[in-house]
Image: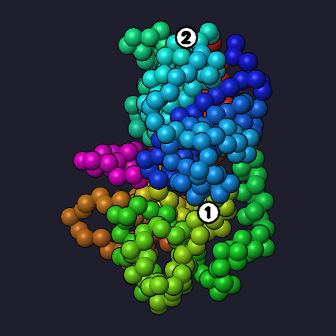
């Protein structure tokens, strides 16, 4: 049996493709493996600048550093010679990245062999259950890696969730002063806090300008908080050279890019959250507030299949959420998008969507947390 004590070692190999999502997930994994299970974690990452945006303690110039107890190595290239003793007990390649050949050769020489995990992306598609935990033999070496899929059912790895996450969220949301203090730190005024507050995190193709127009001309005040750099051109068209502007019933405020912990607080603070990719999508599910997901675009609109699969299981009978989500993600329809009508319908459905969020979290909790599930799986392989 794998000895999951402090002496256990684990390596994660991460290449940043989706700006903050890849390193965001890997950093959560690293923190939880170390912080909750006492594992010695080494995180190999190729983009320290993106890492620093979500965790300011990172030194972008260091090849090797310790961050919150995790050993972080700058993954600069595929070169390098490794010895069997350099190999961790558990090796995770994130989203199928190519681990340096020298490291793989050392894995094959190590006794006992490491547990080799290919950590895959989160999806509600049915095929995921059939592929979760499947083995894949190396074509030349005596090594086997196993696919590990996050997911929404007990036949997958579940969702990332730290042990104290929901208690921390509940304490924060039950304390109006904590919300006010957090938002004030971001520059949000009392009047802006009193409006319906929305956080906005999306990819460039999102129809932000059209939604801004609907909010601007709507019947009630809306405060939209946008981390700097997100929807840059469409936000600049609204706020100009300033960080904040009000037109009609809409105030848009650009806020600093937040650490992971503060981003959670932002999600807990807002009435509606627009999130993107995988990491913020999962955090929005645990925030307990209505959210709109902007999925990472793929060729031939393959991401629309993934989007529909999630909406089918999450948003059953929530037509306003489905309609809004499909249009937000560019799913074509014979009728042009009517953003004022889409927003009005979504807003009217927010109480029902909030209730669904609570039901959804109860279902997800029954699947356990992903890190514990992954360690249980690793034990089963030894």
| Magenta stretch holds residue 227 | no
Range shown magenta: 295-314
Quarter-wise, where is residue 116 in the image? top right
Q: Position of residue 277 (x, y in %)?
A: 46, 52
The residue to which callout 2 is attached is 109
Marks 2/1: CA distance? 42 Å
In the rendered structure, does residue 297 fall within the stretch colored magenta? yes
Residue 51 shown left or right of residue 70 in the figure: left
Which residue lies under the disc numbered 1? 258
* Residue at 69% in and 39% down: 70
Residue displayed at 54% across by 64% down: 273
179 shown above or below 51: below
Q: How is the model colour-coded? A: rainbow
Horizontal relation, residue 47 to residue 184: left or right:
left
| Side (left or right) of 220 relative to 217 | right
Q: Position of residue 357 (x, y in %)?
A: 58, 54
- The total of numbered circles placed on residues is 2
């Amino acid at each position: 049996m794998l000895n999951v004590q402090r002496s256990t070692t684990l390596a994660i190999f991460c290449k940043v493709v989706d700006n903050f999502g890849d390193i965001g997930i890997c950093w959560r994994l690293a923190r939880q493996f170390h912080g909750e299970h006492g594992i010695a974690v080494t995180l190999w990452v190729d983009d320290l600048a993106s890492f620093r945006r979500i965790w300011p303690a990172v030194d972008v110039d260091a090849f090797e550093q310790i961050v919150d107890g995790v050993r972080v190595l700058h993954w600069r290239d595929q070169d390098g010679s490794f010895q069997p003793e350099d190999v961790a007990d558990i090796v995770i390649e994130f989203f199928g990245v190519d681990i340096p050949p020298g490291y793989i050769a050392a894995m094959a020489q190590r006794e006992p062999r490491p547990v080799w995990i290919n950590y895959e992306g989160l999806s509600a598609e049915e095929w995921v259950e059939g592929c979760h935990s499947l083995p894949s033999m190396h074509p030349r070496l005596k090594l086997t890696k196993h696919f590990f899929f996050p997911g929404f059912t007990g036949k997958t790895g579940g969702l990332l969730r730290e042990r104290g996450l929901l208690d921390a969220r509940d304490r924060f949301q039950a304390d109006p002063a904590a919300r006010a203090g957090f938002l004030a730190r971001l520059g949000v005024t009392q009047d802006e806090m009193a409006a319906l507050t929305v956080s906005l995190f999306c990819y460039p193709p999102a129809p932000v300008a059209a939604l801004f127009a609907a909010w601007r001309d709507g019947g009630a005040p809306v405060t939209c908080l946008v981390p700097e750099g997100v929807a840059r051109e469409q936000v600049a068209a609204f706020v100009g050279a300033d960080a904040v502007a009000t037109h009609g019933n809409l105030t848009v405020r650009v806020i600093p890019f937040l650490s992971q912990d503060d981003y959670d607080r932002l999600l807990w603070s807002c009435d509606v959250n627009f999130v993107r990719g995988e990491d913020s999508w999962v955090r929005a599910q645990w925030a307990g507030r209505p959210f709109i997901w902007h999925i990472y675009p793929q060729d031939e609109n393959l991401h629309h299949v993934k989007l529909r699969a999630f909406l089918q299981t999450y948003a059953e009978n929530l037509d306003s959420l489905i309609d809004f989500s499909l249009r937000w993600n560019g799913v074509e329809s014979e009728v042009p998008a009517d953003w004022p009508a889409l927003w009005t319908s979504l807003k009217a459905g927010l109480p029902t969507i909030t209730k669904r969020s609570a039901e959804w979290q109860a279902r997800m909790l029954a699947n356990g947390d992903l890190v514990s599930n992954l360690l249980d799986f690793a034990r089963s392989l030894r």
